[in-house]
Image: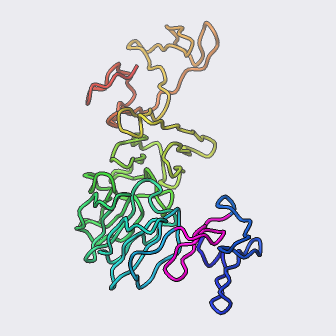
Amino acid sequence: MEFSQEWNDNYRTKQVIHNPSGQEGFVPGCTLSSADVKKNYYIRDDQVLDLQGNVISTLPKNYDSVRSFADGYAVVKLYGKFGMINEQGREVIATAYDEIGIYEEHPFAYGYISAVKDGRTGFLDVNGQETTAFKYKATTNYSTFATLKDLDGSTIVLSAAVDELPERYQEVSFPTRSGCMGFVAQREKGEIGVVGLNGETLVPFTSEIRYISSVTLTTDARLALIRYGSKDYRLYYIDEQKLSGSEQIPAAEPTPAPEADGTWTCVNGHSGNSGNFCSECGSPKPVVQNRFCPNCGYELGDTAPNFCPNCGTKLN
């Protein structure tokens, strides 16, 4: 929430009124707490005040402008360049950038913030260190990702964690502009999957997903809701190991493959069936769909190998 939406700053009376409650803030006697508001710091006469009007810190420089605090950080401007201070008034990012946090409502939500230097986009961490090279003029900026078009029309994705991702995508979709740990991507041949901040595949690419809009991803990339058909929705949970790239999740549960002689084994393990239903338990004949290796995304087709023929990952 923007400061102007939550607070009414009256320059004539010097009062700052909390719009939802009608209470004056940043003065002694204010009963609001940080849990009640989005913006809980205010700058007056180079002093940072809390909700009760206590002086938290004094700004070390006479900045040209100071944006309102968000999550304990504020963007400052000096001699036409932008930087960032924390609530103690310490400059965590030097005033050396054309812009900082263009769209970010929550700075450092996932440990990074975007910036522009000499017209080119890059990223910084909470210590003010540049984590990527500033070499591209990005068309979209987020706190963790940025994108631009390659000469062939494909999309280049810049990650705050690992710089430029090696793969080019036909289309990408991000959960939010204000920081996220992953994104949905579509390859040139139409396969759709989910990619993490380190470039790892979180949900393997598959042609079973028809549209990139069929995937709803949470900003922390822990949950992905995927629509495969009008009535087929699947929820995927991605834990810490998968987010770090050490393990991937399968795109679907494997189904038993037909035997070499044309018979098939049901879900309960009864083999030798030839009709549409198991002769032992009545289970319907499973429909074998294309499967993909959970580690590298290799298409396995209608086979059911124990190991991926492309990367050697154990499958069954």
Residue sticking out furthest to the right: 22
Look at the image and give the residue range highlighted in magenta. Answer: 37-56
Left or right: 134 as drawn, with respect to 62: left
Magenta stretch holds residue 38: yes
- Image quadrant for the N terminus? bottom right
Q: Residue furthest bottom?
A: 12
Residue closer to the observer: 282 or 311? 311
Q: Main secondary structure of the magenta part?
A: loop
Residue 67's x, y, as percent? Answer: 49, 77
The foreground one among 218 and 229 is 218
Residue at x 38% of width, y 51% of height: 190
Q: Is residue 248 above or below residue 36?
A: above
Q: Nearer the viewer, residue 85 or 109?
A: 85
Q: How is the image coloured?
A: rainbow
In the rendered structure, the answer to whether residue 175 lies left or right of residue 64 reads right
Percent across and percent down for residue 32 are 71, 65
Quarter holding the C terminus is: top left
Residue 8: horizontal and vertical position, in percent? 67, 81
Q: Is residue 254 above or below residue 237?
A: above
Q: Position of residue 111 (x, y in %)?
A: 41, 54
Q: Quadrant of residue 108?
A: bottom left
Q: Is residue 33 magenta?
A: no
